[in-house]
């Protein structure tokens, strides 16, 4: 017997496109499709195509949108721009419901190991926005890892001469967590950046 | 802002249909679709539909097939039937390349907790096949868990009066684990060491 029938094999291959999905998991996913209703499978397939077809990136901030300009850029007036690595970071910050300014999505971070320089991410677009003159503060919210820090420093150096305030999201122990489980780097950072009460 | 744009939300929902995929993982999968090529997304969507459309169950053994009778039932002559819980168990045993007989897929096991009795799985069909007279041995290869053992005993009691040899795969497979994840050597050993019931 062929290991699997052809159409099943194709679906297993398709599932391995997903991040972190290997052969075994892909098989498990593919077999489960047979037990879905026809309706659900159609919904699944249609949603896949629809996302690829409709989702574009906002021409101003680079966030997800199904129009030319995203909801946030269209509806908010603000002189603050929060700079993030990926569109899903925007979703995360929006979920926190505390920030009501604009965003700028870099679509990556500076990463020499992967051959990614400042020109490979949307830094130029950020400079253009800031040069427009109506921006007062840039909050850099890239991840607190090596690439994120390097990218943050690079952007700060680039924007400060333009007379804009550049800040970095606070780094320290996450709320609700326990001190004894925090890693050493985070703890050191939290102590160094202590805030007067 | 809407947490996500609508089409993205739909795709995230679709991904939660998959076994073991929660909200977070579904989001990760859905976002990754945007970075796939149009070609890959079409392939993915087509494969989903194709599997649902083409894959049926063999009218003899209950295994996956895209025709009325599966490859194995069509091409093999054998007087031995290996009884398994699910079609993916057939794939697992075939991968071990040690067994060359026929199969019978029960599509479940007796599980009173889930309200599944002997009439809810394909035991009747197995009895009909055995009553045909050309079968000499039944190897019961349900999982070595409580439901699998109960199902095996039930089938053995039912088939022995019909004058067929009934065996159980050897418990080389660790108790409580799942057949599809067993390695090939263990599976081969388990088939070779089957014990008459």
Image (cartoon, coloured by chain):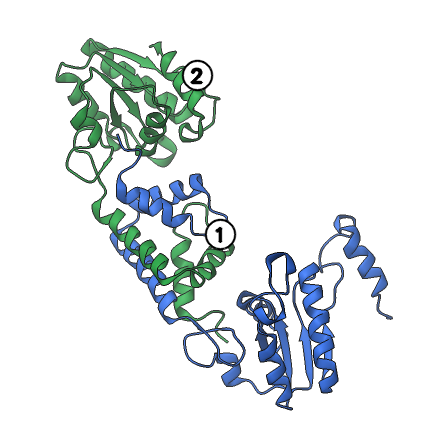
Chain colours: A blue, B green
Is residue A21 at all visible to an observer of this figure? Answer: yes
Q: Which quarter of the image is occupied by the C terminus of chain A? A: bottom right
Q: Which residue is mark 1?
A: A19
Instruction: Determine which residue is flagged by label 2.
Output: B171
Q: Is residue B149 left or right of residue B63?
A: right
Name above or below for residue A15 compared with residue A135.
Answer: above
Q: Residues at marks 1 and 2, common chain?
A: no
Pick the residue in front: A194 or A61. Answer: A61
Q: Front-most of A123 and B67?
A: A123
Give the residue at the far front of this rendering.
A115
Q: Secondary structure at mark 2?
A: loop
Up the image or down, A171 lies above or below B82; here it is below
User: Residue B87 sits in which quadrant?
Assistant: top left
* Residue under the point 20% across and 15% down: B79
In x, y percent, where is residue A174?
A: 71, 59
Give whichever of B17, A3 is nearer the camera: A3
Q: Position of residue A167 (x, y in %)?
A: 73, 75
Picture quarter with the N terminus of chain A: top left
**Residue B158: image x %, image y %?**
24, 16
- Picture quarter containing residue A80? bottom right
Identify the subunit bearing mark 2: B
Residue that lies at the very extreme toward the right in this rendered image: A196
Which residue lies at the image location 61% right of the left edge and 70% below the top edge?
A: A84
Identify the chain of the residue marked 1, using the numbered disc in the image: A
Q: Residue at x 40, y 30 (%)?
A: B180
Considering depth in this image, is B29 or B21 the residue closer to the camera? B29
Using the image, determine if residue A114 lies above or below residue B192. below
Q: Is residue A133 above or below residue A159?
A: below
| 10 Å crowding of disc 1: few (<14), some (14-19), many (20+) | some
**Disc 1 versus disc 2: nearer the observer:** 1
- Viewed as shown, does residue A157 lie left or right of B11? right
């Amino acid at each position: 017997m062929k290991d699997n029938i052809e159409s099943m094999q194709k679906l297993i291959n398709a599932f391995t496109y997903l991040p972190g999905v290997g052969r075994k998991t892909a098989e498990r996913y593919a077999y489960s499709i047979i037990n879905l209703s026809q309706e659900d499978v159609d919904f699944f397939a249609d949603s896949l195509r629809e996302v690829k077809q409709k989702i574009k990136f906002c021409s101003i901030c680079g966030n997800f949108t199904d129009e030319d300009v995203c909801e946030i850029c269209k509806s908010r007036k603000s002189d603050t721009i929060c700079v993030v690595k990926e569109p899903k970071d925007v979703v995360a910050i929006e979920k926190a419901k505390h920030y009501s300014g604009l965003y700028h999505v870099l679509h990556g971070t500076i990463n020499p190991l992967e051959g990614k320089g400042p020109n490979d991410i949307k830094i130029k677009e950020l400079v253009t926005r800031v040069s427009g003159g109506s921006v007062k503060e840039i909050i850099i919210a890239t991840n607190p890892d090596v690439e994120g820090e390097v990218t943050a420093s690079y952007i700060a150096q680039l924007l400060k001469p333009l007379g804009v305030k550049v800040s970095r999201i606070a780094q320290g122990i996450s709320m609700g967590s326990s001190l004894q489980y925090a890693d050493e780097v985070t703890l050191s950072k939290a102590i160094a950046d202590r805030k007067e009460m």
